[in-house]
Amino acid sequence: MYVSMTGFGRAARECEWGTAVLELSSVNHRYQDITVRLPREMYSLEPWFHQKLRGVFRRGKVQLRAEVTWAASTLAVSINREVLMKYYQELYMIRNALGSNQDILLEPLLALPGVQDSSGSAESGWKDRLEILESLLGDAVTDWNRMRMTEGAHLREAIGAHLDELERSVKEIADVWPGERESAFEAMKERIAGAVKASGTSIDESRMITEAVIIADRWDIAEELSRLSSHIDKFRGIGLAPEPEGRKLDFIAQEMNREANTINSKVSSSRIRWITVEAKTAIERIREQVQNLE
């Protein structure tokens, strides 16, 4: 499956405690990286969001951003009259004991511990709201994945074209190689014979051919061509898997590049070297596109 690491998703929900908006955005990253940005009243939920997000993607840099417009009833706090009266009575007794006639103001007393009851405020009550948040997060993830799948389809098309180009290059090298190998072999025999003649020594022709064959085996590229074809087939097969496998595709692209480099280092044929350059260009384009896949 081809799924892009780049995407954006958004979901909003109106509830009795306010209006919540979740936004998901993501970019390329080698590993799984999560950033959660929440309003102050939701700080306690950061680990919860991290846990939920870890299970919905494999790699990429994902940022979740939450915004909440709180309902007035949620922001309001109630006053604990018993606690307030207790503070007032204590201050009243202290004032009399000091012989003071200064008025006792109620506003400063509201900041004392226990006077304001925030049990129904925005910072509490999240246990009862998690079901709504989970549903909202699911909607945002669905929207986010929809965009990533669309972009993944475009990447599949682009990578497929580069794979076809690479496959044509491999086939062309395989078709050209037998003739180039024969020419290189005959040229090697002539160089060996010339070197022997120049040295004034003699060598049995069968021995010379044997030595030439041993040397030729060292620069034979049949195995590299076979592995390249196998890598191409494996790449296409992994792309059809039901789960995103960007990391595996990245590894196979590196192996394809390794085989192309080996071919280029073994052969001296200018024609094959040029075809190999085209193959390496196709591989490099594949690697660039794979970096965008989850």
Image (cartoon, rainbow, N blue to C red):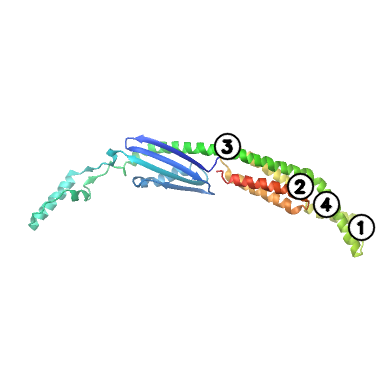
Numbered badge on residue 94: none
Relative to 273, is 33 on the left or the right?
A: left
Circle on res. 222? 2
How far is mark 3 from mark 2, CA to CA?
Answer: 34 Å
First in sequence: mark 1 vs mark 3: 3
* Secondary structure at numbered mark 3: helix
Circle 3 residue: 153
Residue type pointed to by label 4: Ala
User: Mark 1 or mark 3: which is in front?
Assistant: 3
What residue sits right under mark 4 in the picture?
Answer: 184
Which callout, 3 or 2, points to the residue nearer the camera?
3
Q: Earlier in the sequence, mark 2 or mark 4?
A: 4
* Occupied quadrant, residue 133: top left
Kindly identify the residue that appears in the image at 81 percent across and 46 percent down.
178
Type of amino acid under label 1: Asp
Find out whether the residues at labels 1 and 2 contact each other: C-beta distance under 8 Å.
no
Quote the CA–CA distance across marks 1 and 3.
63 Å
Q: Secondary structure at mark 1?
A: loop
- In this view, the residue in front, 114 or 273, is 273
Sequence-wise, the earlier of marks 3 and 2 is: 3
**Front disc: 2 or 4:** 4
In the rendered image, which residue does mark 1 sit on? Answer: 204
